Image (cartoon, helix red, strand yellow):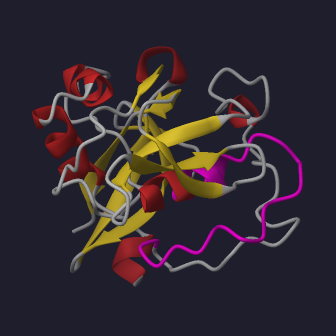
Amino acid sequence: MDRINTTHPAIGEAFGGGFFVGLIRIGASTYGLIVAPKITGEMTGEWGTRKAVESALSFNDGHANTTAMAAAGSEIASWAQSLSIGGHTDWYIPSRDELEICYRAFKPTDDSNSCLSGDNPSAYLPTHPYMPDSPAQTPFAAFRDDGTEAFETEWYWSSTQCAGYASYAWFQYFDGGFQDILDKGYKGRVRAVRRFLIP
């Protein structure tokens, strides 16, 4: 644990082409998660095909999900894979749990949270459902509502397809943190991320 705590930047720090947001566990490995700058790493689009994408079901591995989405013809996945920001070309659409980490670190407003959402077994350390006032509004001015890097107070697509309904995928509101599934044909916001292995 000490090694992990001393080998990553601070949350909100500019790093690796974007901003460090937190830690995610994928299998036996721990990764640092980086969110892309808003001006170059955010767009609006449909999730993609309403047919099943069998390899896009991971709650924590957005990179694998995005690869599967792109192979199935998803325009937002292809967009993410085409990004070159800060010399890095390994950007992807965050999984459900990676997107939750983004909300927890960079919540743009001081609005109450949805207490039905927020459990994240993939986070390091795992987290539990939100309380009305926890997480609080992010302390980082650039990520607060109307800041240059702020997530919009709207919903964002994750790369995680719903396991029970192939035509639906997971999203997260950045106005209160509500998580749910929505038909893939809707246009929603997308914010790219990348990750690095914690040695």
> What x and y, as percent, mark residue 11?
56, 52
> What x and y, as percent, mark residue 193?
38, 40
> Considering only vertical position in the picture, is 174 above or below 43?
below
> Considering only vertical position in the picture, is 72 above or below 132?
above
Residue nearer the viewer, 185 or 41: 185
State yes or no: residue 87 in magenta. no
> What x and y, as percent, mark residue 149?
62, 27
Residue nearer the viewer, 87 or 78: 78
Q: Residue furthest left?
A: 71
Q: Name the image quarter holding the C terminus.
A: bottom left
Task: Report whether 105 appears left or right of 157.
Answer: right
Q: Name the image quarter holding the N terminus.
A: bottom left
Q: Is residue 10 visible?
A: no
> Considering only vertical position in the picture, is 112 above or below 24?
above
State yes or no: residue 113 in magenta. yes
Magenta part of the chain:
101-123
Location of residue 145 by image quarter: top right
Residue nearer the viewer, 70 or 105: 70
Residue nearer the viewer, 175 or 6: 175
- Residue at the spot x=21%, y=25% of the render? 78
- Residue at the spot x=58%, y=45% of the render? 12
Q: Is residue 173 visible?
A: yes
Type of secondary structure dominating the magenta stretch: loop
- Residue at the spot x=59%, y=49% of the render? 172
> What x and y, as percent, mark residue 178?
69, 56
Task: Report whether 10 appears left or right of 25.
Answer: right
- Residue at the spot x=30%, y=51% of the render? 62
